[in-house]
């Protein structure tokens, strides 16, 4: 045999052996069933097989139809302007490019394009009433700010989303918590889906200054969360007495010193729901009822008072600032003036230029016996999907919403969580896991959305009173709240 043939044969045998070893190692569990590729953000694990879920939709050609969206905005809230419905072209921004890619895929597959009109939040209400009353098919979907939505929903201006053909709320691109919490008498008029990130941005969370946490010898806060011991008592035990009088003037001033906990009136609402409390619950027939009056809810309230009435450790923006200036408040934590900081997740992006090394945690539980965390979605900064009753082709609307939601799960949401939040803004790997937990535990309360008898709305302001008599607070609201719920149910029952 020629020498070259022998070498070739030996090389072939070696390669075959190596391949067999690799196959054995994978089957044995020592090699793993995924391939790792390295990108700008570090190792990314690619699944060995396609685990994507696909929508149950037939082939369709919408002949160039433009899917029209009406969306709210509030003047001065530039960082909350809609950015998840329409993108004119790619520009290098992960969110913009993901929206453009998603819309392009849907356009190519179903021959449909998208448009959006942003409108002042109060005008969304009157505009919707006007075009629905006229029977005009002006918009396919309306996003009203949740706190503005009651007159539209109770006025019969929206379709029951359960009646939309093609929409399947069991699929993973729909927020199942919103489906469960926001339905009434088996009807669902507003819902969250992966089409949008503005409602994810509206989710409450806690940030902490990692340098201060180390200096104060805090335990590993992420481990507390994972063990289920991240509670209101635990949080208070860590920060009590830790405010810092940096300028030595004998008082704590947020602009010059360090507060143990930076917050606002919103803490009362998010900690109440975060502790498993409720303003309104539903019975087995999906009928809403007042559920605020309970021993556990009252105990949660007392714990919240312990936090919010502690003037030395807790900074309440709504009491300390005159006039209230959200921009100034949102600069306090990134500029090093707080150990803990109550925020909505859209504040993560506003901290991108900060030198402060921070981590992210969910809203704490009331106690360790609480089975899970709850992350409140703000009714003030989020709007959910609604479909006007004047929709001329509900089957087309349902089809496009299902297709868009399904595609968003695999284009927009990864860009938002993995690239924009985890990759660009969050400072450590552990906070990435916290973000996943926060998104999976989002919660809503009909009493918060509809503010029956001003119960939930006035609850936010209780921190300014110093009053601990929660039973008297409820009694002052009970009659009006019950009357409002009764009227709400009556209105819902008469609309098909």
Image (cartoon, rainbow, N blue to C red):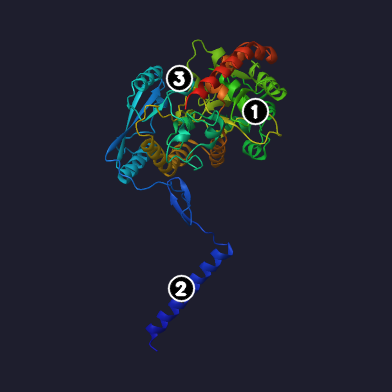
Discs 3/2, front: 3
Contact, CB < 8 Å: mark 3 with mark 1? no
Q: Earlier in the sequence, mark 3 or mark 2?
A: 2
Q: Position of residue 228 (x, y in %)?
A: 67, 37
Q: Quadrant of residue 463?
A: top right
Q: Which one is in front, 228 or 285? A: 285
Q: Callout 3: helix, strand or loop?
A: loop
Q: Secondary structure at mark 2?
A: helix
Q: Is residue 337 visible?
A: no
- Residue drawn at x 52%, y 34% as measured from the top left: 179
Real-space Cα distance between discs 3 and 1? 33 Å
Compared to 228, does 301 lie above or below? above
In the image, which is nearer the foreground, mark 3 or mark 1?
3
How much space separates mark 2 and mark 1, taking CA atoms? 60 Å
Q: Position of residue 153 (x, y in %)?
A: 47, 23
- Residue 51, image x, y percentages: 48, 52
Q: Residue at x 37, y 33 (%)?
A: 85
In the image, taking residue 226 as reference, residue 143 lies left or right, namely: left
Q: Which residue is mark 3?
A: 155
Instruction: Tell me where residue 289 sits by quadrant.
Output: top right
What residue would you read off at disc 1? 275
For label 1, count other residues whose C-alpha is less than 10 Å away and answer few (under 14), some (14-19) or many (20+): many
Give the labeled residue for mark 2. 15
**Labelled disc at residue 129:** none
- Is 10 placed above or below 451 here? below
Quadrant containing the N terminus is bottom left
- Rate crowding at label 2 as few (under 14), some (14 to 19) or many (20 or more) other CA atoms within 10 Å: few
As drawn, is 369 to the left or to the right of 150? right
Give the percent coordinates (x, y) of residue 335. 51, 25
């Amino acid at each position: 045999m020629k020498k070259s043939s022998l070498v070739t044969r030996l090389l072939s045998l070696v390669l075959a052996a190596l391949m067999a070893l690799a196959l054995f190692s994978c089957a044995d569990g020592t090699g793993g069933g995924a391939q790792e590729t390295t990108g700008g953000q570090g190792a990314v694990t690619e699944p060995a097989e396609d685990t994507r879920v696909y929508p149950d939709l037939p082939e369709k050609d919408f002949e160039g139809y433009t899917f029209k969206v009406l969306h709210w905005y509030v003047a001065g809230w530039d960082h909350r302007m809609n950015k998840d419905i329409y993108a004119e072209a790619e520009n290098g921004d992960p969110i913009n490019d993901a929206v453009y890619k998603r819309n392009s895929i849907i356009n190519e597959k179903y021959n449909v394009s998208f448009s959006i009109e942003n409108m002042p939040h109060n005008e969304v209400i009157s505009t919707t009433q006007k075009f629905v009353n006229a029977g005009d098919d002006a918009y396919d979907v309306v996003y009203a700010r949740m706190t503005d939505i009651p007159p539209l929903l109770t006025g019969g201006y929206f379709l029951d989303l359960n009646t939309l053909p093609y929409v399947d709320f069991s699929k993973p691109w729909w927020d199942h918590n919103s489906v469960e919490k926001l339905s009434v008498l088996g009807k669902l008029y507003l819902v969250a889906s992966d089409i949008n990130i503005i409602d994810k941005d509206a989710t409450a969370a806690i940030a902490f200054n990692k340098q201060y946490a180390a200096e104060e010898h805090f335990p590993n806060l992420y481990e507390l969360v994972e063990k289920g011991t991240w509670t209101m008592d635990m949080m208070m035990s860590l920060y009590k007495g830790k405010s810092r009088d940096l300028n030595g003037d004998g008082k704590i001033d947020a602009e010059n010193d360090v507060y143990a906990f930076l917050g606002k009136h919103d803490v009362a609402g998010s900690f109440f729901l975060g502790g498993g409390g409720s303003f309104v619950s539903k019975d087995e027939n999906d009928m809403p009822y007042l559920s605020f009056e309970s021993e556990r809810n009252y105990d949660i309230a007392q714990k919240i008072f312990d936090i919010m009435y502690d003037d030395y450790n807790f900074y309440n923006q709504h009491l300390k600032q005159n006039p209230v200036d959200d921009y100034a408040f949102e600069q306090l934590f990134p500029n090093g003036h707080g150990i803990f900081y109550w925020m909505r997740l859209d504040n993560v992006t506003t901290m991108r230029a900060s030198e402060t090394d921070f981590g992210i945690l969910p809203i704490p539980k009331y106690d360790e016996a609480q089975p899970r965390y709850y992350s409140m979605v703000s009714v003030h900064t989020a709007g959910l999907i609604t479909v006007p009753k004047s929709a001329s082709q509900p089957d087309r609307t349902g089809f496009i919403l299902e297709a868009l939601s399904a595609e968003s799960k695999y284009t927009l949401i990864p860009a938002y969580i993995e690239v924009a939040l985890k990759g660009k803004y969050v400072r450590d790997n552990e906070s990435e896991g916290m973000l996943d937990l926060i998104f999976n535990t989002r919660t809503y309360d009909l009493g918060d959305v509809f503010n029956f008898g001003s119960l939930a709305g006035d609850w936010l302001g209780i921190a300014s009173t110093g009053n601990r008599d929660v039973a008297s607070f409820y009694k002052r609201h009970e009659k009006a709240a019950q009357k409002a719920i009764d009227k709400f149910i009556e209105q819902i029952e008469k609309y098909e």
